[in-house]
């Protein structure tokens, strides 16, 4: 299921409520962006599913196309490679990138998009990919998969026996330590993906969607369709510090204290490790899906109707 489709379904009650309370106001709301953020003109009106950069080289995807930028996102070129259902992007270097295509294959490039290899996996529920080096990456579906050659070939590490439908979110600190959010909860591995233990997340519901991001083995962040949570104990306990609209929430922390979260048509920022949040971006009618930052001064967001935002401090 596409993240923007999830977002639109979850947001329907909120949208209808807003319309009923409109009252016929003639005031036209406008997009508001904090200092450093700007709109990028993008030629494709399709919904964008993910965006990823290393230095000034980056990729974004619509459901059927791949686009590349070599100037930090100011300009984009559509690549020749197409697919029926792009889901996510992972990058190991400026040359090495891989693209999840639901339900069961991964496209990888080793020359920055000039050519692609196709790997078909025995898995019908692939949604996410994560690189921990230039050529080592993990993918999440019904099983956890690993590549050591940038995505050309994949080895199955572990197969879950619980429900594998829905969106899976994957995050690795290194080649040994990682987490995955699945429909039935959060799981952690400390042996390179061979074994996974369920992490208690009382009060969070990942049945529709979720996301995970860890700064260290003890400090991590999760979202479900409504809430943001933080742990300082490796997941032994979680504190909810943000409740947003029912939607898909992406997370990216650039330091231990500075982080961002998407919330429909908004981006929120924290400067105290997630304890408090303030609005950075408000768009009138274009929900945002993904965030990516390379450092505290450079970031991007993408979403519906070809929306790309760039942050350059």
Image: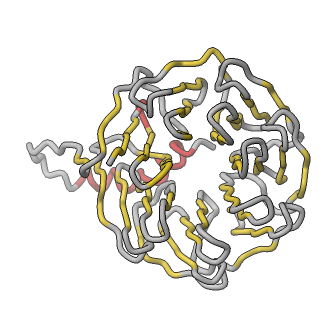
Residue 189 locus on image (x, y percent): 80, 68
Indicate the quadrant where residue 218 lies: bottom right
- 40 left or right of 35 in image: right
- 46 left or right of 64 in image: left
Residue in the image at 84% along x and 44% along y? 147
Residue 199 locus on image (x, y percent): 72, 76
Residue 95 locus on image (x, y percent): 66, 31
Of 277 and 23, which appears nearest the observer?
277
Instruction: In the displayed orientation, state which residue is furthest to the left.
Output: 26
Q: Image quadrant for the N terminus?
A: top right
Color theme of the render: secondary structure
Vertical comparison of 99 with 189: above or below: above
Vertical comparison of 43 with 8: above or below: above
Indicate the quadrant where residue 117 lies: top right
Number of numbered callouts drawn: 0
Residue in the image at 37% along x and 40% along y? 310
- 227 left or right of 166 in image: left
- 201 left or right of 224 in image: right
Vertical comparison of 110 with 92: above or below: above
Residue in the image at 36% along x and 62% along y? 269
Vertical comparison of 75 with 30: above or below: above
Residue in the image at 52% along x and 39% along y? 55
Residue 224 locus on image (x, y percent): 55, 64
Instruction: In the displayed orientation, state which residue is furthest to the top.
Output: 80
């Amino acid at each position: 299921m596409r993240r923007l489709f999830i977002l639109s379904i979850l947001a329907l009650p909120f949208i209808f409520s807003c319309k009923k309370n409109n009252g016929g106001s003639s005031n036209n709301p406008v997009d508001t962006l904090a200092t450093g953020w700007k709109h990028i003109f993008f030629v494709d009106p399709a919904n964008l599913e993910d965006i990823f950069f290393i230095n000034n080289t980056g990729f974004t995807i619509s459901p059927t196309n791949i686009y590349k930028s070599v100037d930090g996102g100011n300009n984009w070129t559509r690549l020749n490679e197409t697919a029926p259902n792009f889901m996510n992007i992972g990058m190991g270097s400026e040359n090495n990138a891989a693209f999840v295509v639901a339900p069961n294959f991964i496209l990888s490039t080793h020359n920055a998009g000039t050519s692609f290899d196709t790997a078909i996996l025995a898995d019908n529920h692939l949604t996410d990919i994560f690189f921990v080096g230039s050529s080592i990456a993990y993918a999440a579906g019904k099983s956890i998969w690993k590549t050591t050659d940038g995505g050309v070939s994949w080895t199955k590490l572990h197969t879950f026996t619980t429900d594998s439908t829905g969106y899976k979110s994957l995050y690795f600190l290194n080649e040994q330590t990682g987490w995955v959010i699945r429909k039935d909860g959060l799981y952690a591995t400390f042996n390179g993906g061979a074994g996974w233990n369920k992490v208690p997340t009382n009060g969070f519901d990942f049945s529709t969607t979720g996301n995970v991001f860890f700064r260290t083995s003890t400090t991590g962040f999760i979202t479900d369709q409504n809430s943001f949570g933080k742990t300082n104990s490796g997941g032994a306990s979680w504190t909810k510090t943000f409740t947003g609209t029912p939607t898909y929430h992406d997370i990216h922390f650039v330091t231990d204290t500075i982080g961002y979260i998407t919330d429909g048509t908004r981006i929120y920022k924290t400067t105290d490790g997630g304890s408090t949040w303030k609005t950075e971006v408000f768009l009138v009618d274009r929900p945002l899906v993904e965030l990516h930052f390379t450092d505290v001064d450079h970031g991007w967001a993408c979403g519906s109707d070809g929306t790309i935002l760039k942050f350059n401090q």
